[in-house]
Amino acid sequence: MVQHDLIVRGATLPGRTRRYDIAVTAGRIASITPHVTQPGIAADRCVEEAEGRLVMPGFVDSHVHLDKSCLMGCACGGVGGLKGAIAAVSAAKRGFTSEDVYARGARTLEKAILKGTTHMRTHVEVDPRVGLVSFEAMLELKRRYAFAIDLSVCVFPQEGLTNDPGTEALLLRALDAGADLLGGCPYTDTDPQAQIERLFAIAVERDLDLDLHLDFDLDPHGALLFDICRQATRHAWQGRVAIGHVTKLSAMDEDGFLRAATALADAGVAVTALPATDLYLTGRDRRADIPRGIAPVHRLFAEHGVLASLATNNVLNPFTPFGDGSLLRMAQLYANAMHVRPEGFELCLDLVTRLPARLMRLETYGLEVGAAADFVILDAPDAISALAELPTVVAAYKRGRRTFRCDPARLDAPPEEGL
């Protein structure tokens, strides 16, 4: 009898109807075989009875801001929409300490882990106001929570680059100290095109991926995404650039959307929608016919082959004063707001699993033999039910080790009289 470190028995897998047994050895999936009542494989360490529950690869959050999460107590401004939120956090971060950022980031990170997230990309503000305080806290979070989640750190200039002396030097110091990739925010710069050009120059020189905040408004004209696509093509950086928000896509007519989708597909630029923040901040000046402001990333992928994802962005701060770290909830919010029918629910789940894994270039991700054993068990019979009902995440495994278990709630009904 073959021995393994872990066996998950009787699992339902996305897109399949029968049950399967998943064997894990040395942190990787060793086999996925049809479920049998009498097991022909055994585990030295652990057997998990899935009992027909859905097993999925761990959720992948491709765009989070751990450094400014959980700020409701000290930065509840943001009355003026996006600009107000940026100003409120700008004032607050002058008083950040590494201990403070670590504590707030850990609170949010643990929420995400307990909701089944196994990979995350956090954007971290670096500028003369906060220095490297938040970045250093992120490196410590990355180290401390590696048992449960792979944390990728993206440093970026929230308040501009060319107009903010000292910011570039700090970004370069952070990259030297171990940041994983470089981000940007051209729409806050006095010279957006110059920021884009400089970020690409640094990325190419240092062989880095790029992930930029972009086009955060509802004017369909003047989209910077075309500048990003030109630079990605010019530098042969296809497959290494992502842009987040891109709310202009939600305001374009079909011709404009087609031009944008074609440019993104040709340049190999990925798009991340951030439903909670984009719904909360866009269209705030309207009193009727209020727009959603969410980039239709399911259409970008399904109709045009543009790599896409959904992500959390902000949690409990002026940008987004709610959030529990659940990507399953975020996928449902997106599906609801974007009128996605049940036949599209599995794609919405792909937007928080395998597609952001591709965006982040996770080479060993997935439910297949040889992949890292990073998966979650949901108290649902299939993917459609998982998105529709937001079931309990029963357990998560990271490299074959269980990181938590949460038994589903059950009614404690009293016995019937006379029985």
Image: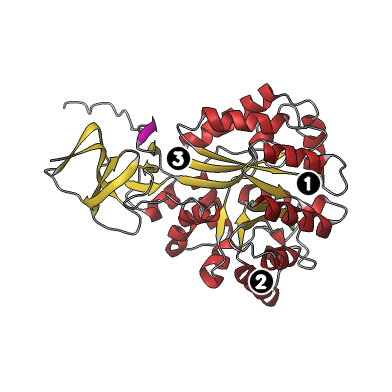
Q: Mark 1 to mark 3: distance in Å?
A: 31 Å
* Front disc: 1 or 3: 3
Residue 84 in the image: x percent, y percent? Answer: 81, 42
Q: Element type at marker 2?
A: helix
The residue carrying mark 1 is: 81
Q: Element type at marker 3?
A: loop
Left or right: 411 with respect to 64? left
The residue carrying mark 2 is: 263
Q: Amino acid at mark 3?
A: Gly
Q: Is residue 78 visible?
A: no
Q: Element type at marker 1?
A: helix
Q: Quadrant of residue 97?
A: top right
Circle number at residue 116? 3
* Front disc: 3 or 2: 2
Q: Mark 1 to mark 2: distance in Å?
A: 29 Å
Residue 70 in the image: x percent, y percent? Answer: 65, 31
- Residue at position x 70%, y 67% in the image: 234
Q: Mark 3 to mark 2: distance in Å?
A: 34 Å
Residue 49 forms part of the magenta stretch: no
Left or right: 127 with respect to 271? right
- Residue farthest toward the top in the current orientation of the protein: 99
